[in-house]
Amino acid sequence: MAHDSSLHRRRVQLGLTQTELAASAGVSRQLVAAVEAGVNTPAVDAALRLAMALECSAEDLFEAAPRRRGIGVMASRPTDWHTDVLVVAGCDPALAIAEAMFADKGPITLLALDATTGTALRSLHDGGVHAAVVHGRAEHLPQPPVDVIRVQLARWQVGIGLAPGLKARTLAACLEHNVLIVQRQESAASQQALRRAVNALGYELPGGAVTSGHLDAARAAIGLGCAAITTEGAALMTGLRFVPLELHTVEIWLDRRWEHHPAFQTLGNLLRSSAFAGKVSRMGGYDLTGCGSVLPTMAASSAGS
């Protein structure tokens, strides 16, 4: 069957197979095929994940964007959003814990989407999400693309995870002996940290498999018996030896237009709770000092990007 869907055109434009897109979006390959063939319309969460993986809006992919509880998928206007749903994009596994803990909050819902820092910020600028999770060196965080409220989430180490049995014990040794390094997209803050570390050692960043998240990278390193750029927490969860490269601060940036969103108020209370701290701490690699506290205002980028 000939494909003429927007999803198919965008996937081909980015050079992705159906399997690669499905893995990046966290959906099945069969769903991708069915949507491209026009025999299936994805649920709102799947539509958002597909759009995030393709770095565009769901409205670009689907002529009639799926709707749930009145929420406009990847809406361009704040008035399109349902007031009970808070959509947050980012690459912190703790988001999934927060999302699960929202289950007993009644109609208020947190929808956590996996995305790199760069992709999350682009979506925040375009009005596709309410908030973005941003991480990087504290003194070198990007400028917000819109006026935001900054909330402290955590601090963690970004570094190289080494598979058990791997003889290389440092990034330099991996580079010297051409050890495969599983990497992230260029818009990922961890990938940028890897590039800085490689350049500081006088090497060119080698090619390597690219995954969509810290935990995926760590799991790939285990499966391939190689190295990966990941976080200390993901390395601990998968049994990798961890070599730190940079200490990153992790923040949630909420579009200030949503300051009084009821789910944001609930999220703040949850982040400050001992229950959340206990669940996240069990993963390891997290410094939750000040988690849930509001941080000083940061000027938005005049370019809005």
Image (tube, grey):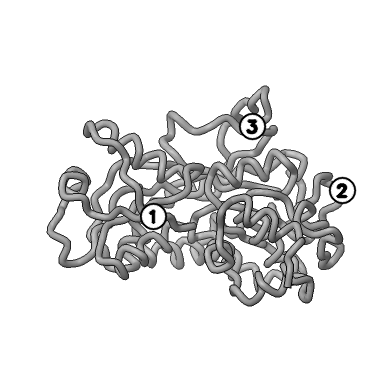
Badge 2 or badge 1: first in the primary sequence: 2
Residue situated furthest front in the rendering? 2
Q: Amino acid at mark 3?
A: Ser
User: Residue at (79%, 59%) from the top-left corner?
Assistant: 62
User: Mark 2 and mark 3: span between their CA atoms?
Assistant: 22 Å
Badge 3 or badge 1: first in the primary sequence: 1
Q: Nearer the viewer, residue 228 or 31?
A: 31
User: Residue at (76%, 61%) from the top-left corner?
Assistant: 5
User: Residue at (67%, 53%) from the top-left corner?
Assistant: 10
Residue 212 location, x and y as percent? 49, 57
User: Mark 2 and mark 1: span between their CA atoms?
Assistant: 36 Å
* Residue at mark 2: 79
Q: Nearer the viewer, residue 217 or 131?
A: 217
Residue 288 location, x and y as percent? 43, 52
In the shown orientation, is residue 271 left or right of residue 229? right
Residue situated furthest top in the rendering? 302
For label 1, the SS is loop
Q: Which mark is residue 305?
A: 3
Q: Residue 179's quadrant in the figure?
A: bottom left
In the shown orientation, is residue 75 left or right of residue 265? right
Q: Amino acid at mark 1?
A: Tyr
In the shown orientation, is residue 20 left or right of residue 41? left
Residue 61 location, x and y as percent? 75, 56
Q: Amino acid at mark 2?
A: Thr
Q: Is residue 130 above or below residue 196?
A: below
Q: Residue 249's quadrant in the figure?
A: top left
* Residue at mark 1: 286
Residue 149 location, x and y as percent? 65, 39
